[in-house]
Every structure is written in structure tokens, then in C-alpha cells.
Image: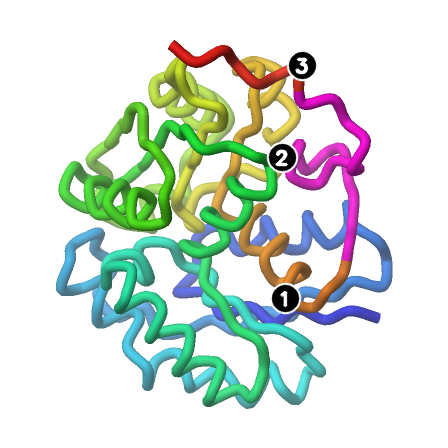
Amino acid sequence: MTTVGLLYPGHSAEDDYPRIAVLLDSDIRLPLFHTDIGEDAHRTDALIEMGAPERLAAGVEELRLAGAESLVWACTSGSFIRGWAGAQEQIRELARTAGLPASSTSFAFVHAARALGATRVAVAATYPEDVTASFEEFLRAAGLEVTAARASGVVTAAEVGTWGREQVLGLARAGDDPRAEAVLMPDTALHTVAYLEELEAELGKPVLTANQVTVWEGLRLADRKAWADELGRLFARPDWDRSEWKPDAE
């Protein structure tokens, strides 16, 4: 049994996680604790407060009791908004509090892109322009080239959580760029798990989404390998052929 503990802000797309658990091996558990979101706003001050140490610490003991072997702060904007150094300090503090390997969705995107060998990425974000720009800066600090970024201007996670298939696919199409080796969709409030196969088939390249990479990161920290075709090329078995999707540099 492998147990990945998840700290998830509020209530928007948390049902993506049981869906992932069903698609993965039956001995993988993804217990989730909802942290206090505070003000639901994709705005710098609100996002910094949402990821404050005391808010995250509130859920740690429950996840420890659930037998978590690793812990992920399942929030992208509430981590990258602090910048590279601030996001690192956030997870260091979380790891100290939990006594477990810890990470966040922001770092999950970086590690997942590297695992796929993608150095040029496009961003398809639900966020306003300034918050999307902060994510771009975070990715560049990690050594990734952001070839294009699409900001949708949505202010609240509650609104993002209502988006369905057509809106998700439309955002991915709008955010894609021919130079990009992968498309990143950075919002754990966005339902994406049901559409991963369709997204990748349409764009012809890996699509990394927030809830998908969050689970992958937790499993990576727990040193657990898992595969599921329905979860995209990030969860593909190691023998898949990269040449089928990696575009030529322009």
C-alpha cells in the first residue's frame, strides 16, 4: 500500500483525485484534507495568505494518521506566487511539520516536465494576466523555456471548478504553441482528469495538468511507480516512443 497525502484548498475539483485513484493500482491511496482557502481570489495577497504555514499545518496531523508516506500541497498558485525561493521554503516548512517528504503542485510541474524531457513549454492558465506571469517566472527560474502563455482572467477557484469539457479543451487549444514540447494547465481547481487522453490526442503532445502532476509528484516522493494510459503520457510506461510527439525546434 502506498499512501500520498494531499492538502487541497477549498472545494472545486477535488473529485479529480478519487478518479485518479481508481485509474491507478488498487493499493494506492490518496487521502485528502481541505485547507482553509480564506478569500477565494486569484490575487497575489490572497494567494500568499492561502498558503500560509498555519493554514497548511492544520491538515498535517490528519494526513499523518492516515499513513501518508509523502505529502503534496495541491495548489499551484498558492505556491509559485511566493517565487522560487519562497516556494522552496514553503515546502521545507511543510516537510519539517509533517516529518515527511513534501512538495507542491508548482514543483510537480517542473519535475514532470523534466521527466518527459520537455524543456520548452506553453502555459494554458485560468488565471488573470499577472498571476499567469508569476507562473511563467517560476518556470523560467527552473530552467524551462516558456514559448507562449494564455491567461483566461478568471478570478475565483469556484468559477474554475464549474468549467466543463469544452472549456477545458478550448483553453488547451488557445494555450498551445507549435514550439512547445508540452502544454501546462496550472490550476487544481480545474477538472481535467477525465479529458487527458482527448487533450493529448488533439494537441499531439503531453498535456500536464495540476491534479495529474500533483499525484505523480506524491508518488515520486514515495518512490512508487505507477502507470495508467488514461492519465496521459506522464503516466505512460517507460517504453513509449517520444518521437511521436516531440516537435522540431523552430
Query: Around disc 1, counting alpha carbons within 10 Å, would you say few (fewer than 14), some (14 to 19), or many (20 or more)?
Result: some
- Amino acid carrying label 1: it is Leu
| 10 Å crowding of disc 3: few (<14), some (14-19), many (20+) | few
Which residue is pictured at 51% across the width and 40% down the height? 113
Name which residue lies at 71% across and 82% down. Answer: 67
Contact, mark 3 vs mark 2 (Cβ under 8 Å):
no
* In the foreground, 141 or 83: 141
Mark 1, residue position:
221
- Per the image, label 1 sits on a secondary structure element best described as helix
Q: Amino acid at mark 3?
A: Glu
Q: Is residue 153 left or right of residue 64?
A: left
| Residue 175: x %, y % from top left | 35, 22
Structural distance between the alpha carbons of marks 1 and 2: 24 Å
Question: Reading the chain from its start, which is encountered first: label 3 or label 1?
Answer: 1
Query: On the image, numbered disc 3 is attached to which residue?
Result: 244
Residue 212 in percent (x, y) is at 58, 46
- The residue indicated by pointer 2 is 194
